[in-house]
Amino acid sequence: IQIETNAAEIMQRFHQLPGAVQSGVLKGLKRSLIDLEGQIKRRSGVNFNRGASGLAGRIASYAKPASPFGVDAAIGFRKTKAFPYELAQEFGAKASPGKAMAIPISSEAKALSYAGRGPRDFPGGLTLIKGSKNAVLIKDTKLVGGKMSGGEVQYVLVKSIPARLYFRRNVIAAIPEISRDIVEAEKESWRNL
């Protein structure tokens, strides 16, 4: 992302600043990026209540000195072994014709997904149950009186995922705020010298 002019000037002369001012600028930038992480979580259409295995646990940011460029800073999602779920949430996704995408629901399915494996690798196998809205894959079902009984839902099968993360839009909207935070952090650091 391209920050505003005043902040860009500070970043260009970052290595010429006294150490205490450099430290203050980095702290201001880190605070701004952490705040942006929270804004992304609040402003998206995605449920972030999934802990470390979901998007909320993978969003990350950092800011550190980088020679000769001044500062290296980024915000994004940590890499996973499987299909990048955050891309499906940002841009939307559709299953191939006649196919479906399996969305992990249980903690066991999420752990398997985080390890880069899917429903076909599920220990003990799964049973497909077709519902009125979505089909589900269930573990430990039994046939009782001609009907399937018991079991825990592991995956929900869907034909598409709507675009709803709005990560890029939120980052672009935060550029003025990030720029202001850099400028204010530099001013405050000079005052505290």
Image: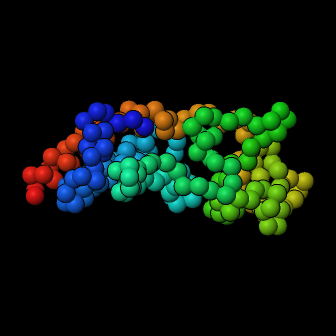
- Residue 70 in the image: x percent, y percent? 34, 50
Picture quarter containing residue 153? Answer: bottom right
* Colour convention: rainbow
* Image position of 120 (left or right of 23): right
Q: Closer to the camera, 40 or 125?
A: 40
State the count of labels: 0
* Image position of 113 (left or right of 60): right
Q: Residue at image x 54%, y 55%?
A: 78
Q: Is residue 16 visible?
A: yes
- Residue 126 in the image: x percent, y percent? 81, 58
* Image position of 79 (left or right of 153): left
Q: Residue at image x 79%, y 67%?
A: 123
Q: Quadrant of the C terminus?
A: bottom left
- Residue 146 in the image: x percent, y percent? 90, 53
Q: Residue furthest bottom?
A: 123
Q: Residue furthest right?
A: 146
- Residue 172 in the image: x percent, y percent? 41, 33
